[in-house]
Amino acid sequence: MSHSDSLVSRFFRLQLAARADPNPDLAVRQRRLRALDRLLRDNETALIDAVRRDFGHRSPAETRLLELFPSQAALTHARRHLAGWMRPDRRSVGLWFQPARAEVRHQPLGAVGIIVPWNYPVYLAVGPLVAALAAGNRALVKMSEMTPCTASLFADLIAKYFADDELSVVEGDAGVAREFSGLPFDHLLFTGSTAVGRQVMRTAADNLTPVTLELGGKSPAIIGPGLDEPDFAHAVERIVVGKCMNAGQTCVAPDYVLLPLGQEKAFIDIARRVLATCYPDIEHSADYSSLIDRRHYARLDSWLAEARVSGARIVALAPGVAADPEQRRLPPLVVCGAGDELHLMREEIFGPVLPLRTYLDLGEAIAFVNQRPRPLALYYFDRRRANIERVLRETLSGGVTINDVVLHIAQDNLPFGGVGPSGMGCYHGFAGFETFSVRRAVFRQSRFSGVGLLKPPYGALFERLTRLMMR
């Protein structure tokens, strides 16, 4: 069977099943969430190994910490709160409509699509699935062709734990992804680059398919002015650790740093100590991941070459450790003096390269962020409440972590999403439940309603009543 036939038939199987059972009860939804939880727990070792093989080397500890743990936490959170999420939400009615009643009911959209990126192939499949299944939907999942081992394993496991009219996984290349985004889903969630997100949205528009786009961008880390030595060292440590996770291949990784003028050397000195502590033998460390493929390695290599030619200073955080093109291992680098025209300052880096830019005062740092496309995440390090509130008030990003990095994404009670070029819509926790639900307005009229008086023929009584209503 061709990819086209298989894809279309899988979609219509899910759609027909969703139409036949449009509003699964709590027990059915909980069963599906438990099945997904068992899939992860029963196959932890196999999933970690599949991701490792796709990357050439991916730290098993990072896959456990950054993919399996948040996936299971999301499932636990959803199962614990699902009954409450499903209850009708009572709303007040206007004075002139009483004693009628109003409520909002969350009902499933039906058959939804999820397009998964390569950088966290387990978590970024499971996270949206938790929201979709909790909301009562059936789902078709397109895995990335850049992680074929994980895609194949996940497809096999989903087929084992779920009926094919509940949940199905599609493999295939970019052509399959384009066809996938052209199916008439009731909702489509895409995680990936801004450029591909635009294509997905254009294709989905033909069916008026609503989309949630989880994109990326250049997420800044700002170190506030006048920090004392311990707070400055804490900021550097958290930025370096966040940047090195998955070798920087994280959509919410710190993309560049803004720090007070004159503190570059202090930043580099502390960053080197942090790296030596976390990765004492980074060249052979099992905890440091490879870049996903040769194309991404070559991309970063060319951007660094461009920076060198421009006069920017490239500083190794692991001095004496050479890059390894064969294993696609690139030791972390800091770039000082990178001009705005460079790819490193125009494009999302998605690798272990960290430009440092300086500012004279906090207002200049805020202006630098605001002159650029709105980022997926923003990180600010400071202990002064006035400065923190100023940054929150005067900038806009999808999410914020104060005095750390990345951790807002792991909070199931917070919505996760971007703004403008970094994304559209959000999910996680109740926000995800809402994304994959129809918020259905229900108005219940009372037999004693006076609204029946407001009907033709419009005479003196109508005039008196409308004047009274409009006071």
Image: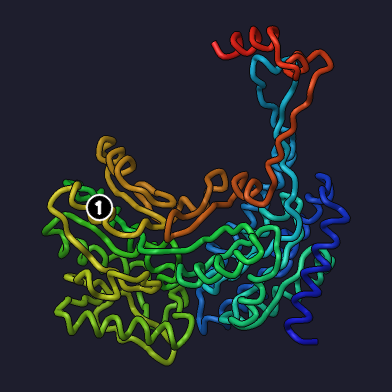
Q: Is residue 58 above or below residue 359?
A: below
Tell whether 41 sits left or right of 309.
right
Using the rendered image of the protein, determine whether residue 45 is visible from the camera's viewpoint.
Answer: no
Q: Is residue 221 above or below residue 285?
A: above
Tell whether 264 sits left or right of 246.
left
Q: Tell me the quarter of the picture where residue 149 sits.
A: bottom right
Closest to the observer: 187 or 84?
187
Residue type, label 1? Ile
Using the rendered image of the protein, determine whether residue 270 is visible from the camera's viewpoint.
Answer: yes
Q: Quadrant of the C terminus?
A: top right
Residue pictured at 53% horizontal, 47% vertical: 415
Q: Quadrant of the N terminus?
A: bottom right
Percent across and percent down for residue 315 are 21, 75
Residue pictured at 66% horizontal, 10% vertical: 465
Percent across and percent down for residue 377 are 40, 55
Q: Tell me the quarter of the picture where residue 462 sits.
A: top right
Residue pictured at 70% horizontal, 7% vertical: 461
Q: Tell me the quarter of the picture where residue 45 sits.
A: bottom right
Secondary structure category for the residue under label 1: strand
Q: Which residue is mark 1?
A: 223
